[in-house]
Amino acid sequence: MTTAGRPAAPIFALGGGVVAPTTANVFGVVSMVFWSITLIVSAKYLMFILRADNDGEGGILSLAHLAHRNVKHGGRRHKLVLILGVFGGSLFFGDSLITPAISVLSAVEGLDVAVPGSTHLVVPISAAIIVLLFAVQRFGTHHVGRFFGPVMVVWFLTLGILGLVHVVADPIVLTALSPHHGLLFVVQHPGIAFVAMGAIVLAITGAEALYADMGHFGRVPIVWAWFALVFPCLTLNYLGQAQLIMRDSHEIANPFFHLAPAWAQLPLVVLATLATIIASQAVISGAFSVARQAERLSYLPRLTVRQTSEQEGGQIYIPVVNWLLFAGVLLLLLLFRASERLATAYGVAVTLDLLLTTSLFCVYAVAALKWKRWQIALFLVFFGSVELAFFSANIVKVVHGGWLPLLVAATVATVMTTWARGRERVTARREKLEGPLTQFLDEIHGDAKILRVPGTAVFLHPNKTTCPLALRENVQFNRVVHDETYIVSTQAVNVPHVPDDERVVIDDLGDPYDHVLHITLRYGFSDPQDVPAGLQVARDEGIDLDLRTVTYFLSRITVHPSDRPGMGTVRKRLFGVLARNAADPTEYFSLPIGRTVVLGARINF
């Protein structure tokens, strides 16, 4: 909703009327809004950021790994990119909590304009919408997706028409688009302009969403939709609000809904609510995608991921993320109870996202695009300086709610870095227990006491250098090896999708006759890691195995914190909690439960 033409009200309501609704002030604010959108969205994102796509996928996490892939390994920039990427991804979850709450509240608050005296219904109706929104997530987004395009086209056309009516009534308001009005406002009222920037930033809150949604729509459709529909309609709506405020200062409280005639205000509330539900759905789906990307990049434990569409690989549902977001969004709605109060928390998160994206793009531009220093300097002058001004104007709101997204980001970043660090330590300990794979195969090959039994065994294991604990345990206690033995590793590739013809890598481990093969199944961070489906691809490439009779073996590791140095006690306990609550690998890898054997081991770290 913040990108739908609502920033004027909080700007002119600041401090009980600090920004007086004079013609000069209104023109100055509208000019600042228009040129902020032009610079940050139209120029920075559509001309530069959207060109930094990771095989078609966008978003700050994709940008971070594009930069990470191109910088020198082990250098300062390499570490910096990792830090920025983790914090940027963490900050996205803070945005994902605030966006549905502020969007739904801002739409339903229009009810008090259409039906005076209904203020007490805003929170209950908003809460009901939030409950319904999260409850239907498990059914998938394709149902909402059918109405996404038509509803949003109607929505933006409505914005444009509402604004156009008022612009035609007073065309002089068009001159507010001149940049000199914004510059005069800043020069003549620097203090007021600085405070106003804290609200103006809400006009560009959808910028990061454009980038994150690139994988769903593609860069060209986004650019066309923005310049042909969204940008002109938003501009007309802001101009219409400006004309309304100048004509009647009593409309300051809620100029957006007052743009419509009385008979159309209630339908406008309904349409706004539908638009915010779609916008919230996009953010929730984005949270699912970011969580799966983080998991594939070893920053989160295995998550239970359910595919909700047979045609679209990106349509997924992650129960734990959904219900954590639901609890957080509902809590925010009940605590803040007004979109204007939530806006103070929102600005800090948005401006930090903008600065992180700019910083990561600069690293990427130097490493991959070979930009010169003067090009980076110009980029920072035009975009970084504006975003830094927005951030400075919002940082003063930290004590008034801006701490919320920072706290969420810090918590998620702690979880992500703890898991990454703990996983490194546990992996090192596990590899010592497993021992070299080739040495183990040589030992069992020459041991006459170990029997060959008919059948096919698949051992899931993260690499081909060490021996799967399940294989070692099976040989040690049962003294048998299956006639056909496959060690299968899944590899997360830093691309969204891996085609089937690049899915499988086969290695005979130096002996093509011992009936032991290693198979690597490669998956992009948006691909479900379905091992039987991957083995079917291997079978199609000539591997002789009958998937109906395969027995799958898993090595289950139980971790226990110890007094070993390298991690603090609290972080060790947190890692233990995360490990115990990781998704069941049988379900995660889509293994048949009736033909899966789990053998375990304990590791102290």
Image (cartoon, helix red, strand yellow):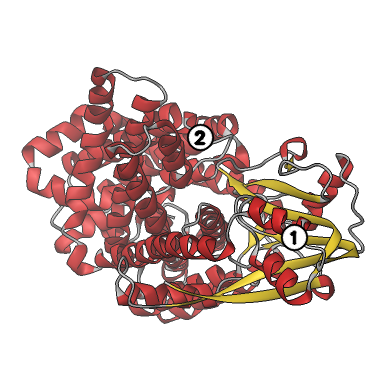
Whole-percent x, y for residue 547 in the image: 89, 58
Q: Give the label on residue 226, or none.
A: 2
Dot 2: few (<14), some (14–19), or many (≥20) neighbours within 10 Å?
some
Which residue is label 1 attached to?
444
From the viewer's perspective, tell me whether residue 462 is left or right of residue 521.
left
Residue drawn at point x = 55 percent, y = 69 percent? 322
Q: How many marks?
A: 2
Which one is in front, 8 or 216?
A: 216
**Figure check: 78 above or below 563:** above
Quarter occupied by residue 188: top left
At label 1, the amino acid type is Ile
Relative to residue 330, is residue 157 drawn left or right? right
Secondary structure of the residue carrying numbered label 1: helix
Q: Nearer the viewer, residue 162 or 548?
A: 548
Q: Residue at x 24, y 30 (%)?
A: 380
Which mark lies nearer to you, 1 or 2? Answer: 1
User: Which one is in front, 277 or 188?
Assistant: 277
As displayed, is residue 316 above or below residue 135? Answer: above
Position of residue 250 relative to residue 602, above or below, is: above
The percent coordinates of residue 584 (x first, y second) are 65, 72
The quarter holding residue 415 reads: bottom left
Look at the numbered disc 2 and give the secondary structure of its residue. Answer: helix
Residue 562 picture location, percent across and down: 37, 78
